[in-house]
Image (tube, rainbow, N blue to C red):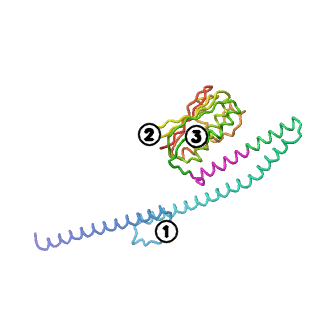
Amino acid sequence: MSNGMWILVSVGLILVVLVVIWNSRRTKRTIDTIERMLDVAMEGDFVESRFDESRLSALETKFTHYLSASAVSAQNVAMEKDKIKTLIADISHQTKTPLANLILHCELLEEGELSEEMRGNVETLHDQTEKLRFLIDSLVKLSRLENGILTLSPRRAPIQPMLQNVFEQFAAKAKDKGLEFEIQSTDAYAQYDPKWTAEALGNIVDNAMKYTKRGGIAITVTNYEMFVRIDVADSGVGIAEGEQAKIFTRFYRSETVRDQEGVGIGLYFARQIVTGEGGYIKLTSAEGQGSMFSVFLPK
């Protein structure tokens, strides 16, 4: 091969190496730029800048537009949450005083001289007002939880103080209904929010109290390696198999218990709380044979 051919081959190889190096560096710059965009976007501070097409590839430009649109969407979601938060606060504030006044005047009327018919009407009005207050309070709490305004704060804590809290809350009601109510002592710990988990468990116990006419309610605890299981067992009316998948939905009430007090939101709220803590609720029941709600809390 002549010297001229060797020179041409050598120049060609050098050009190929230079092109490979240039493309490698250009690809690295593009990847580095996209990585920086992602880092800024994850921090929530992404702002679109003007880019020179000669410096950034079409992929970078499209990615920039996508992240800008995502940032705008996130801002819109945040604004909507602020509006919902304000609306919920307004509802809670504006209804609190009228409901308190209604309950106060009902109590004053009940203390006065009333005919049997009028007393019955006032007691009905009092009961319905209390029901309305409970419903509004529950809806406000639920809306706060679903919209991220109310946040759960799980921490490692003993189970027994929460169970004792629930027992003290419902012991008098059980006694008035002639029901047995007992809790098992335990030294188990779990990762949960004591305040809101107590409310969730209280909703389950309250539900059991409503639909149990004789016998009683027992709360027992089983300690597993990954979870703590809290069972709330009752000797009530039980739940038909066809309805068991529906009772955790919002405002669901079985036709068989329409005459009982309640609005159908307690179990839904309980599941939202427990699920938000990384746990779950399981139901075991048969119509006419009582029910057992099992709350699994992560350890």
Of the numbered discs 3 and 1, the one sitting upstream in the chain is: 1
Looking at numbered disc 2 in the image, what kind of residue is underneath it?
A: Glu
Quadrant for residue 32, please give it: bottom left
The numbered disc on residue 225 is: 2
Magenta-colored stretch includes residue 150 = yes
Sequence-wise, the earlier of marks 1 and 2 is 1
The residue positioned 24% from the left and 70% from the top of the image is: 15
Principal SS element in the magenta part? helix
Taking the image as shown, residue 267 lies to the left or right of residue 43, namely right
* Element marked by disc 3: helix
Q: Please, is residue 274 above or below residue 214 in the view?
A: below
Rendering coords of residue 92 (x, y %): 70, 53
In the figure, is residue 17 to the left or right of 127?
left
Residue 7: percent from the left, percent from the top? Answer: 16, 73
Residue extending farthest top: 288
Disc 2 element: loop
Q: Residue 221: x percent and y percent?
A: 52, 36
- Mark 1 belongs to which amino acid? Glu
Mark 3 to mark 1: distance in Å?
A: 53 Å
Quadrant of the image for the N terminus?
bottom left
Q: Tell me which segment is drawn in magenta.
A: 132-151
How many residues crowd around disc 1 within 10 Å: few (fewer than 14), some, or many (20 or more)?
some
The amino acid marked with disc number 3 is: Leu
Mark 3 highlights which residue?
163
Q: Which of the numbered marks, if any, corresponds to residue 154?
A: none
- Report, in whole angstroms, how far the alpha carbon at label 2 lies from the one at label 3: 20 Å
Q: Give the number of the mark in front: 1 or 2.
A: 2
User: Which residue in the structure is indicated by mark 1?
Assistant: 48
Task: Report the front residue among 48 and 271.
Answer: 271
